Image (cartoon, rainbow, N blue to C red):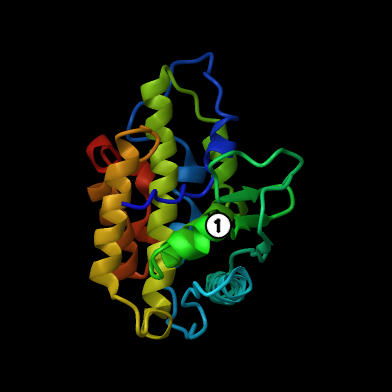
Amino acid sequence: MLKPLSLPAVALLAALLLPGTADALTSPIKNVPALTDNSLYGSGKIKSSECPDGALSIESAPAAKRTITALWRCLNTSWSAHFKHAKLPFTPAKLVLLTKPAPFCGKKWKKGFHSSYCSGTKTAAVLVDEEYYLQTREIYHFTYIAALYGDHLQEITGMARGFVALPYKNKAESFELERRWMLQESCLSGVFLGSVWETAGEGSEGWPAMLKLVKSNGDYRSKKDRYFAKGKNIVYWLDRGFKSGDPGFCNTWKAPSARVA
């Protein structure tokens, strides 16, 4: 079995989480409007659009870069239109593609990571080395890249500020907060993918194959790192976003702990 790619580098944000002096928040999260009652949840269903050039090429790094760039362009276009329709402020996300680790966002590239997001510059970076374009199943990069964009959505809607301010009592609570964050990214990626799947997913193995792959990846990672959710919960949130097409279905902060385990 190929070693799965790391999910978007939420650990960079999680490193900012510090124990609060007051009693830690219990799960589900309460009284944090930026997370629990964000305006994005009321923005409605995203409009379907086309994204015909987003299927991953595994021929070479340049080919993989072209398809990732095309998918990122679709993400910016789709979410920009959605935010405009909902009368919400929007800033497009920039993208940097690397073929080898390099400093990003003023920090050394974290070993083992294949992506990162810099809130200061609203820029995402993806390491497109041979492990990425040769060992990644063609359909997996859809949710991987779309979930990375979810980091940007959480930033521009104010969720990131609410997240880093959350206190916690112990490592277990910290891990649960991080899982809520990442599962929301998965759900938001599903919202986008559902809106473009007719063209972006054309000729692929299909959505059921995607869910099976994501479950396997989640099961593998969660046994090693508890800030990764179990496969069944990643599938639940990803598919929930895909089928609803509505960010309002991605409020992981109000979900019971069992749904974010």
Relative to 102, say whether 134 is above or below. below
Q: Secondary structure at mark 1?
A: helix
- Judging by the rendered image, the residue that carries numbered circle 1 is 153
Measured from the top left, where is residue 155 in percent x and y? 60, 50
Q: Nearer the viewer, residue 144 or 56?
A: 56
49 up-or-down from 139: above or below: below
Label 1: few (<14), some or many (≥20) within 10 Å?
many
Name the spot of residue 232 as percent of width and height, x first: 23, 49
Residue type, numbered disc 1:
Leu
- 192 relative to 232 in the view: left or right: right
Up-down: is 138 above or below 16? Answer: below
Q: Residue furthest right?
A: 106
In the image, 208: left or right of 79?
left
Residue 13 appears at what percent x and percent y? 58, 38
Total marks placed? 1
For residue 215, side relative to residue 92 (left or right): left
Q: Position of residue 149 (x, y in %)?
A: 54, 60
Q: Quadrant of the C terminus?
A: top left
Q: Which residue does the image show at 62% across and 54% down from the upper left?
A: 156
